[in-house]
Image (cartoon, rainbow, N blue to C red):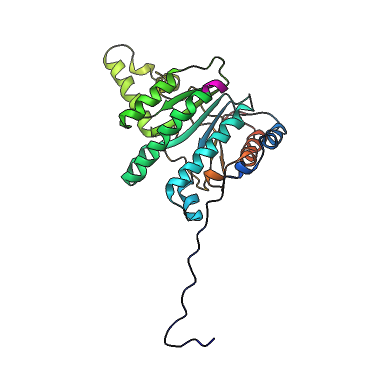
Amino acid sequence: MLVSMSSPPPPPPPTTRAPPPPPLACVPRPVCDALLSTLDPPFPKHLALIMDGNSRWARAAHVPTGLGHVAGVSALKSTVSHCLSLPQIEVLTVYAFSTENWGRPPAETAALLALIEREVLAEAHRLLQLGVRLRFIGDLERLPASLQATLLKAADREPPEQRLLLCVALSYGGRQEIARAARRLAERVEAGEMRATDVDDDTFAAELRHPECSVPSDPDLLVRTGGQLRLSNFLLFQSAYTELVMLECFWPDFNAEQLAIALRAFAARRRTFGRR
């Protein structure tokens, strides 16, 4: 076929790419359990996760950002199931929405918060039956009223036998959490309830945990997906001696194999907390 030099050939038709399913969707649960059962102790009692990479996963898949968040929810559900199969893990804390995330486009923020509300409504009872207690931490008063009510109702319910405490950080910022605790301590000093010299690491840590607006203990292991090497304002005070594992995979691709990599790295480390 002859092609005129004055008119370029027509471009190829656009192609669409369907989002790849999270790997876990294709892996039978017994296979995942078998993989995790091969791990050696020690295990973290408190595992924290920075679930980074939903948006980049969506861009790589050429799908709307919202589908990246949906895939991220699927990965979180699977991760909770894996933690339930490891009784040594007592607390799972996840970074779901930061104070900095309020700076995203309003439409994206509204869609993400609506997704969170739908999932809490849909999953709260099932998690309760599995022995999962829910706790939500952060500046929750900034959230929409309907979401606040949903979170409060879900957090008020206790499982018959608690197997895992799932702490979900929403509208959360580590610096802001520290500032709020400092203000409360200053108010107590001003009211004569305590002396300024009474404020030390222990009293400050206790103030961070009271009332139940933060994590109950310091994380033993913090895992971040998405390839970035920073804490992004997450559990700053509590992570002073936390072991860190940074993974390249985007959060929707986090699966039993990735969890096993992080847990093996944790088990291989010797935690001295500055001592010999």
- Image spot of residue 209 (x, y percent): 43, 21
Numbered-mark total: 0
Task: Say left or right for 127 vs 112.
Answer: right
- Image spot of residue 19 (x, y percent): 52, 51
Q: Residue furthest left?
A: 190
Quadrant in which residue 37 is drawn: top right
The vertical placement of 247 against 141, above or below, is: below
Q: Does the magenta-highlighted stretch encompass residue 157?
A: no
Q: Is residue 209 visible?
A: no
Task: Say left or right for 80 vs 142.
Answer: right
Quadrant in which residue 243 is drawn: top right
**Which region is colored magenta?**
128-132
Q: Pick the residue in front: 131 or 16.
A: 16
What residue is at 55 percent from the left and 18 percent from the top? 162
Task: Say left or right for 255 vs 150.
Answer: right
The vertical placement of 130 against 68, above or below, is: above
Q: Is residue 108 visible?
A: yes
What residue is at 53 percent from the left and 44 percent from the top? 252
Q: Quadrant of the C terminus?
A: top right
What residue is at 49 percent from the left and 86 percent from the top? 3
What residue is at 42 percent from the left and 37 percent from the top? 115
Q: Does the magenta-highlighted stretch encompass residue 131?
A: yes
Q: Residue furthest front?
A: 1
- Image spot of residue 159 (x, y percent): 52, 17
